[in-house]
């Protein structure tokens, strides 16, 4: 019995024709597929979106991301500030209460290196591996859904949820920070210079987009690991482990310029976009590195899944 990922053929069932149903060749097309079957209509995106939305891990992760900014607001409200805002070397945490945009930048800086990585790895690493773990993957392919289409639909939905996760945290942080600390001009970490909030707001949108693109490496690796295992925890953990190892390696000065090819080296380049004189050079390099890694890893994922034995 072939699934739909081999030569593109479909299973014929007794209910739709075939020799077993006694209707001969009248129930099948010339290519052997059942009459009325259209590969392009299998596993619609809307169905996969609903399936993934109903997962408990989706609810928990989005609940955590939306609650974190308010937890940080409470922490700043009840905490005791050390040092004043007039210091000569201000950290981004020292300026978090200076206004909504400052608070959103702080929330993004403390979450992008781990929490958002876990969220993206969870959505992209769990999507195929969980189906294999539940033994439902073979039945999806026997539906029949072509392998490339199944993988593409799952990847699109996983990336959609990942993008929503990356966007919802800074947007909620901007809302929470504005309500808690007001809407004021942005103060730049390090120098304390002031920039008009309306001038920074478009740049902050660019920052969110850059953080989203920088997470593509995590998404692609998690997806590659997901198509080769039936353990979602292994796929998610492998992607998070990559970020940890890359972060450790970029601290090794002996590597010199080779560190620029590490997937996490340019992750904080978005801070340059919030400077009085924005510099997007590091962000351009970061996008190039991230997109290249993501394209290669995604291609390997599709190649591996085409040859995978989903029955054993």
Image (cartoon, rainbow, N blue to C red):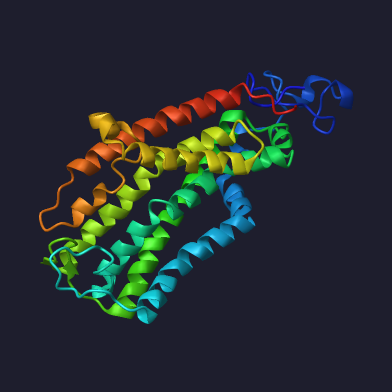
Relative vertical location of residue 214 with respect to residue 68 in this rendering, above or below: above
The image quarter in which residue 226 lies: top right
Q: Position of residue 237 (x, y in %)?
A: 55, 42
Q: Is residue 43 visible?
A: no
Picture coordinates of residue 280 (x, y %)?
A: 18, 45
Q: Position of residue 110 (x, y in %)?
A: 36, 59
Most foreground residue, 302 or 18? 302
Horizontal side of 49 relative to 109 (left or right) equals right
* Closer to us: 261 or 87: 87
Q: Residue at x 35, y 44 (%)?
A: 213
Which residue shows up at 12% across the image and 62% down it? 191
Of 13 and 290, which appears nearest the observer? Answer: 290
Side of 160 where 263 appears, left or right:
left
Q: Report whether 202 appears left or right of 220.
A: left
- Quadrant (top left/top right/bottom left/bottom right) for the N terminus: top right
Query: Image height check: is 308 above or below 109?
Result: above
Q: In the picture, which quadrant includes the C terminus? A: top right
Q: Quadrant of residue 7?
A: top right
Residue drawn at x 28%, y 53% is 207
Rendered location of residue 175, percent (x, y) = 35, 72
In the rendered picture of this protein, how many numbered marks are placed on residues? 0
Vertical order, 34 against 125 (above or below): above
| Residue 274 appearing in the image | yes
């Amino acid at each position: 019995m072939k699934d739909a990922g081999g030569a593109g053929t479909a299973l014929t069932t007794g209910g739709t024709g075939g020799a077993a149903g006694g209707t001969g060749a009248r129930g099948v097309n010339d290519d052997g597929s059942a009459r009325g079957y259209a590969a392009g209509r299998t596993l619609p995106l809307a169905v996969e979106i609903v399936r993934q939305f109903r997962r408990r891990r989706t609810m928990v992760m989005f609940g955590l991301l939306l609650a974190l900014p308010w937890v940080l607001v409470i922490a700043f409200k009840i905490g005791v500030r050390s040092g004043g805002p007039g210091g000569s070397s201000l950290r981004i945490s020292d300026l978090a209460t200076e206004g909504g945009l400052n608070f959103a930048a702080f929330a993004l800086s403390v979450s992008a290196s781990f929490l958002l990585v876990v969220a993206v790895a969870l959505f992209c690493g769990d999507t195929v591996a969980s189906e294999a773990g539940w033994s439902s993957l073979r039945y999806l392919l026997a539906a029949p859904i072509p392998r490339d289409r199944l993988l593409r639909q799952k990847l699109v939905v996983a990336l959609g949820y990942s993008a929503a996760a990356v966007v919802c945290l800074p947007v909620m942080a901007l809302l929470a920070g504005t309500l808690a600390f007001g809407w004021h001009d942005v103060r730049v970490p390090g120098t304390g210079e002031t920039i008009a909030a309306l001038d920074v707001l478009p740049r902050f949108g660019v920052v969110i987009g850059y953080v989203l693109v920088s997470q593509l490496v995590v998404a692609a690796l998690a997806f590659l690991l997901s198509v080769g295992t039936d353990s979602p925890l292994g796929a998610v953990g492998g992607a998070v482990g990559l970020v940890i190892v890359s972060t450790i390696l970029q601290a090794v000065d002996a590597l010199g310029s080779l560190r620029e090819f590490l997937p996490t080296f340019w992750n904080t380049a978005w801070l340059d976009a919030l400077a009085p004189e924005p510099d997007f050079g590091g962000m351009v390099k970061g996008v190039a590195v991230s997109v290249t890694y993501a394209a290669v890893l995604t291609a390997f994922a599709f190649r591996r899944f085409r040859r995978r034995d989903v029955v054993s």
